[in-house]
């Protein structure tokens, strides 16, 4: 673990992101956290807001008891709020919310209500600030992500193939697509830092084919590079077969089965990374408690495949896998946007 003390470059990184979020003097800023949140990031966010002349305040809730049958990691759906009326009132009244909860509000049930009130939510992924400081978003990131979102929204079909054996089709009609470039400056919007990714949430029955996770691909729920291939067969959104020998396949089979929930086997979202500064090898550089792996979701050219909750398909579950896959070709209506893991200009 790196030493948890305030460092000037880390404070400067938080200040830069708050500036991008239009944090102006006198602006009320809610620092949303829970008792198990990374204390260093909370301190950095508060100091950065004060340096910009904002009026920050803390809203810290108890981290809820574990309710799932297995450990829960990297879901993007914080359970800390649990509909708390006073906390929600404070959030609805805050123009800018810095989300420092462990899992983040991105897929939390309360997010829709918070955004509807006009609040904007900046989710700071639960990373050590050393990683965050390397990945401060830049103004030019916005155009690249918006262009990718436009192409995904216009597509009728996504097809993903790879030399490892992947051949997956996604019907894009009716899919909900969003892009994150790393900050939010408009009321009623949400973003996360690190950013640089586009994801689509397909409608029910839209995903079919085969996804091969090769050695070296990543299981971010386990914060682990795969050592041996795992072959997933998908029919009407759901993983119907998990083939492979060794630890990786065994871990995935056991974790999926532990939920006892068919929705845990279903597709949450698909997309690709756009951040040229994000590093695939970064997961090897941090203790597991010091990384949430958002950098690996965003590294340029990865195919990001996720299973679990997809509210746009009417599925809700805490079981979740984020699986960045390398070396894929991603085509939208036959036109490649990624070729063998490399972004197409």
Image (spheres, rainbow, N blue to C red):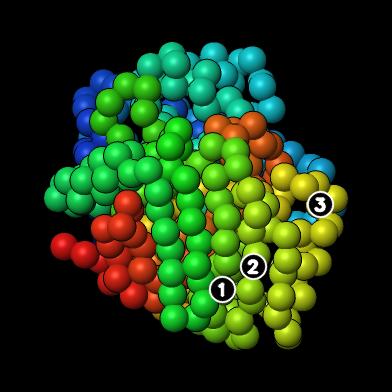
Distance, label 3 to label 1, CA atoms, is: 23 Å
Tag 3–tag 2 contact (CB < 8 Å): no
Identify the residue at horizontal 51%, vertical 23% (top origin): 112
Distance, label 3 to label 2, CA atoms, is: 18 Å
Q: Is residue 223 left or right of residue 194?
A: right
Q: In this view, does 306 lie to the left or right of 28?
A: right
Of residues 245 and 279, the one nearer the viewer is 245
Disc marking residue 256: none
Residue 264, image x, y percentages: 71, 49
Quarter the C terminus occupies:
bottom left
For discs 3 and 1, the disc positioned in front in the rendered view: 1
Tag 1–tag 2 contact (CB < 8 Å): yes
- Say which element carries label 3: helix
- Label 1: few (<14), some or many (≥20) within 10 Å? many
> Looking at the image, is 244 positioned above or below residue 153?
below
- Label 3: few (<14), some or many (≥20) within 10 Å? some
Of residues 49 and 114, the one nearer the viewer is 114
Residue at numbered disc 2: 232
Q: State which tag comes first along the sequence, 3 or 1.
A: 1
- Say which element carries label 2: strand
Residue 17 shows in the view:
no
Q: State which tag comes first along the sequence, 3 or 2.
A: 2
């Amino acid at each position: 673990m790196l030493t948890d003390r305030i460092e000037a470059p880390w404070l400067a990184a938080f200040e830069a992101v708050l500036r991008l979020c239009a944090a102006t003097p006198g602006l009320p800023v809610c620092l949303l956290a829970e008792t198990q949140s990374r204390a260093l990031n909370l301190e950095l966010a508060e100091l950065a807001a004060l340096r910009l002349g904002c009026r920050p305040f803390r809203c810290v809730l108890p981290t809820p008891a574990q309710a799932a049958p297995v450990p829960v990691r990297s879901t993007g759906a914080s359970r800390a709020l649990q509909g708390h009326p006073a906390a929600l009132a404070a959030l609805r009244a805050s123009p800018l919310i810095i989300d420092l909860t462990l899992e983040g509000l991105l897929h939390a049930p309360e997010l829709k209500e918070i955004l509807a009130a006009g609040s904007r939510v900046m989710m700071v992924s639960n990373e050590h600030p050393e990683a965050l400081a390397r990945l401060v978003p830049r103004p030019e990131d916005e155009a690249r992500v918006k262009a990718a979102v436009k192409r995904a929204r216009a597509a009728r079909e996504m097809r993903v193939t790879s030399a490892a054996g992947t051949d997956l089709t996604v019907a894009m009609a009716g899919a909900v697509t969003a892009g994150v470039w790393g900050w939010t400056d408009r009321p009623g919007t949400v973003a996360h830092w690190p950013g640089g990714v586009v994801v689509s949430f397909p409608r029910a029955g839209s995903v079919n084919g085969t996804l091969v996770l090769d050695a070296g691909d990543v299981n971010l729920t386990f914060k682990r590079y795969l050592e041996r291939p795992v072959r997933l067969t998908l029919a009407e959104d759901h993983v119907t077969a998990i083939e492979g020998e060794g630890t990786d396949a065994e871990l995935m089979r056991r974790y999926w089965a532990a939920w006892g929930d068919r929705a845990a086997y279903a597709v949450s979202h698909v997309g690709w990374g756009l951040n040229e500064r994000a590093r695939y090898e970064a997961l090897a550089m941090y203790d597991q408690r010091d990384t949430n792996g958002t950098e690996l979701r965003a590294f340029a050219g990865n195919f990001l495949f996720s299973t679990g909750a997809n509210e746009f398909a009417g599925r809700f579950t805490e079981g979740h896998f984020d699986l960045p896959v390398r070396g894929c070709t991603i085509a939208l209506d036959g036109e490649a946007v990624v070729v063998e893991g490399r972004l197409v200009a």
